[in-house]
Image (cartoon, rainbow, N blue to C red):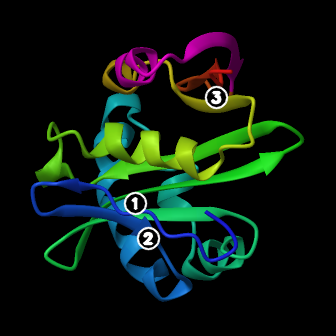
Amino acid sequence: MTGGQRTRVSLTSMHISLATIDDAAAILDLQRRAYQSEAAIYDDFSLPPLLETLAQLRDQFPDKCFLKATEDDHIVGSVRGFHTASTCHVERLIVDPEYRKRGIGTALLQQIEVAHLSATRFELFTGHKSVNNIRLYQRRGYRPFRREVVSQKVTLVFLEKTAAP
C-alpha cells in the first residue's frame, strides 16, 4: 500500500487499513501481548519481537507497509511487509490473543499480499514449534524452503509462496 492507496476489508465489525506511525505504540503493545504465547512455547522470553523498542518500531515506518486490523477503533491485529527485488518479506503477523481464531490473521496475510501486487514471491518465517502459524501459512499457499537455527531453543522455518500469474 503505497502512494496513498487504502484498503479496507470487513469481517463483521473488523476493518483492515494502512497503519500510521501514530499507531506504533498500540502495535508494539499488541506485539508484546501476542508474542507471549510464542515465548512460552519456546521457553524463551528474549524473542526479538518482545525486545523491540518503540523507537525501533517507529524507525521502520518509512520503509515498510504496516497494516492494522481494528474492531471498534481498537487495534486487534497487525502485519508488516517490505519489498526487496521481486520478493515481499512478510513480518510480525500478530493478532490479539482474545481475538484469535476469527480469521483476522488470514485476512491480514491476504491484505499484505494485495498491498504488494508487484511481488512475484512472498517470504516469511516462524519458529519450528509454532504449528498453528505454519498451518495458517501453508493453507495460504506458503511452503517451507529452509530452516535456520538461531538458538538451542529456536529454529526458524522460512516459507515462500509464488504469486499467481
Residue 47 shows up from this direction: no
- In this rendering, the label closer to the viewer, 3 or 2: 2
Residue bearing mark 3 = 151
The crowding category of the residue bearing disc 2, from other C-alpha atoms within 10 Å (few below 14, some 14 to 19, many at least 20), is some
Q: CA distance from mark 3 to mark 1?
A: 21 Å
Residue segment shown in magenta: 134-149
Q: CA distance from mark 1 to mark 2?
A: 5 Å
Residue underneath mark 1: 31
Q: From the image, which quarter does the N terminus lie in?
A: bottom right
Relative depth, front residue between 12 and 28: 12
Q: Secondary structure at mark 2?
A: helix
Residue found at the far right of this picture: 85
In percent of the image, x 54 and y 45: which residue is there? 114
Label 3 element class: loop
Distance in Å between CA atoms under marks 3 and 2: 24 Å
Q: Quadrant of residue 21?
A: bottom right
Q: Is residue 87 left or right of residue 154?
A: right
The first of marks 3 and 2 along the sequence is 2
